[in-house]
Amino acid sequence: MTATRLNGLVEVEIDGHGELLRLGIDTTGLDSARLRLVESGIVEAINDAEDQSADLEERLLAQIFGEQ
């Protein structure tokens, strides 16, 4: 799963187990005043990707074992 935040400034990718595979930060035009914003964007992007992974896992398990 991949998630982006801050208009593409921060992008994360996790695997199906929720492990962080890649963290990308577009530093073009980044100044120190935006650093805290980027840091919070990283956390939000990771959480979004983890949520997507959990949703996908839930859907796949429902397909395999049927709706419960």
Image (tube, grey):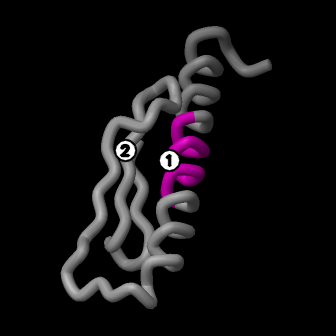
- Give the residue number, with chain letter if any, for mark 2: 13
Q: In which quadrant will I find the C terminus?
A: top right
Give the overall secondary structure of the magenta segment.
Answer: helix
Could you say which is closer to the camera, residue 62 or residue 15? 15
Q: Is residue 16 left or right of residue 67?
A: left
Residue 44, quarter of picture = bottom right
Residue 43 in picture, x, y percent from top left = 56, 58
Is residue 46 rendered magenta in the image? yes
Amino acid type indicated by mark 1:
Ala
Q: Is residue 56 left or right of residue 9?
A: right
- Is 10 located above or below residue 59 in the figure? below
Count residues near mark 2 (Cα–Cα under 10 Å), then give few for <14, some for 14-19, many for 20+. Answer: some
SS for callout 1: helix
- Mark 1 and 2 residues: CB-CB less than 8 Å, in contact? yes
Disc with the residue nearer the chain's start (1 vs 2): 2
Amino acid type indicated by mark 2:
Glu
Could you say which is closer to the camera, residue 19 or residue 2? 19
**Residue range highlighted in magenta:** 45-53
> Residue at horizontal 44%, vertical 69%?
5
Residue 59, quarter of picture = top right
Q: Is residue 25 left or right of residue 68?
A: left
Could you say which is closer to the camera, residue 28 or residue 4? 28
> Residue at horizontal 41%, vertical 30%?
15
Residue 17 in picture, x, y percent from top left = 50, 24
Q: Which mark is residue 49?
A: 1
> Residue at horizontal 47%, vertical 31%?
19
- Is 50 located above or below residue 3 in the figure? above
> Residue at horizontal 29%, vertical 57%?
24
SS for callout 2: strand
Q: Which mark is residue 67?
A: none
Residue 64 in picture, x, y percent from top left = 57, 11
Is residue 29 rendered magenta in the image? no
